[in-house]
Image: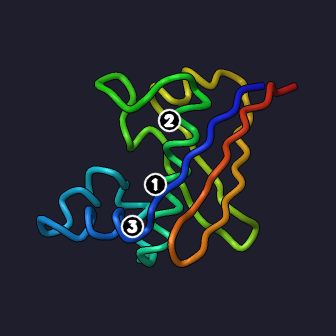
Amino acid sequence: MRTGTDVVENSRFIRSVSRNSGRLRNRLFTPDELKYNPGELDLAVMFSAKESVAKALGTGFDSALSWHDIEVYITENGVKAILSGKALELAGNCEVLISATRDRNTCLTFALLTEGE
């Protein structure tokens, strides 16, 4: 079992992804993640969840692990992650579970990687 957690200050994150014609938004999120037009607070949760998963994988984001290797979706059943590339390789047969909460000011996410059967 491996864990990772992250906290995001919403206003700071929103300022960052709003600058430079949204270039950072496109670097952090895949077209599939953005196609449902998530709001700014949802994007903050998605970003925090990616960070939590990367920490649970034991890495950060670098030349080996891309932001696009971890796709995050907010559904009516919670926050879900789909791994590909290096993230999938690092996770092995682990299942990824994510818990998230937010208010106006911050969001907090927790990722748990559990060994599969």
Q: Amino acid at mark 2?
A: Ser
Q: Which residue is mark 3?
A: 34
Q: Amino acid at mark 1?
A: Phe
**Numbered disc 2: secondary structure:** loop
In the drawing, what numbered circle is on residue 82? Answer: none
Q: Which residue is mark 2?
A: 84
Q: Position of residue 18 (x, y in %)?
A: 23, 70
| Residue positioned 78% across, 25% down in the render | 1
Q: Position of residue 20 (x, y in %)?
A: 12, 65
| Residue positioned 26% across, 62% down in the render | 16
Q: CA distance from mark 2 to mark 3?
A: 17 Å
Q: Position of residue 101 (x, y in %)?
A: 67, 65
**Numbered disc 3: secondary structure:** helix
Lower position in the chain sequence, tag 3 or tag 1: 3
Q: Quadrant of the C terminus?
A: top right
Q: Which residue is mark 1?
A: 47
| Residue positioned 60% across, 75% down in the render | 103
105 or 35: nearer the eye? 105
**Numbered disc 1: secondary structure:** helix
Quarter of the figure with residue 77? bottom right
Q: CA distance from mark 1 to mark 2?
A: 16 Å
72 or 105: nearer the eye? 105
Select label 3 or label 1 by which is in front: 1
31 or 80: nearer the eye? 80
Select label 1 or label 2 by which is in front: 1
Lower position in the chain sequence, tag 2 or tag 3: 3
